[in-house]
Image: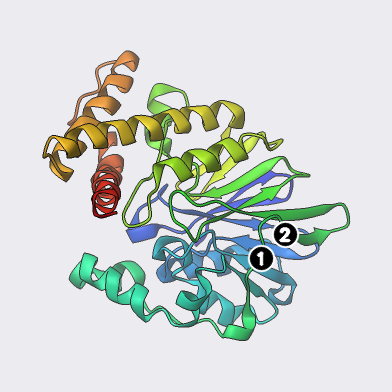
Amino acid sequence: MSTVLNLGRQVHQIDVREQGRTERTSCYILDTKNVAIIETGAAPGIVYLLDALKSLEIAVQRVKYIIVTHIHLDHSGGAGQLARELPESQIIVHPRGARHLIDPSRLVAGARQLYGERFDEYFGEILPVPAERIHTPEDGETLELEEGRSLTIYHTPGHARHHIVVNDSAGKGLFSGDAVGSCYPALSRLIERDYILPLTPPSEFDPPTFVETLDRLSKLDVENIYFTHFGRAAGAQSIFPRVRELVVTFAEIGRSIFNSGGGTREIEAILWDLVLGELSQYGEIDRNHPFLKYLESDMELNAAGIVHYFQKMKKG
């Protein structure tokens, strides 16, 4: 059932078919002495991860770490189910996120309000994670994989206050969650370069903090970025400044429109103009191009997050 993509350096990528879509959400398995799984995706995708473990002939007892970069359900919704299937594992989550894995009721309520009757199809049953199974790493803490190889956890607010990234220094790879945005494979193939945009959804998007995080990450010795959305991109040191510049641009657009009385719809329209302007240099790509459907939900959420940020700033 699962398609396991061997990326080298003992890293395997699994497409967990979020909302039935391919190339939307990827999780990663590090097949080292102490096996680590980075991201669970939503609960319906757990079947793909379990199938991947079987395909790789990884015994469940070898899985020591289940790491979620943050508690948004497309990243952590399957944590409870996966923890039940992998009894020797610790669940690694930012200290701010732990209580929501122990009691996911608020996450579920918020997502049900947003997705309505589609919630069960998209997210399935959200099981709690036993408190004793959770570990909340300090900023800069390391997790041992095997002799000579460990993962370093960094706290990376900006997209969300409860966000962490995972640096595999021996493999020179960064598992970025949403801290470095999203890579869109279909568009990347179309334009023959990785196409990456920031992700700025409500309710914790914070542009100055986002920029600080990107500046910090740019100092790491990283070659590859492993995006949750979606897949691996090389040339990390060119990706960080691009995303930084776009975060600043998104915030400037938001400030201008918000101060002139505009809102989400107006900001989203300008964001689309920005994207289409970038893509136009690669050929005739207009708003109706089928590959742009992959951006639609993200653009709407990006605009909403920008508005939410300036609303908070106005309230003080």
Name the residue that disc number 2 marks: 141
Q: Viewer-proximal residue, 163 or 46?
A: 163
Q: Viewer-proximal residue, 136 or 48?
A: 136
Residues at circles 2 and 1 in contact by the CB criterion of under 8 Å:
yes
Image coordinates of residue 251 in percent, x first then y, are: 32, 36
Image coordinates of residue 122 in percent, x first then y, are: 31, 66
Q: Residue at x 19, y 72 (%)?
A: 117
Specify the amino acid type for callout 1: Pro
Toward which corner of the image does residue 260 lie, by quadrant? top left
Residue 180 drawn above or below residue 38: above
Name the residue that disc number 1 marks: 137
Q: Residue at x 29, y 54 (%)?
A: 316
Residue 191 drawn above or below residue 71: above
Toward which corner of the image does residue 174 lie, by quadrant? top right
Q: Which mark is residue 147?
A: none
Residue 231 drawn above or below residue 53: above
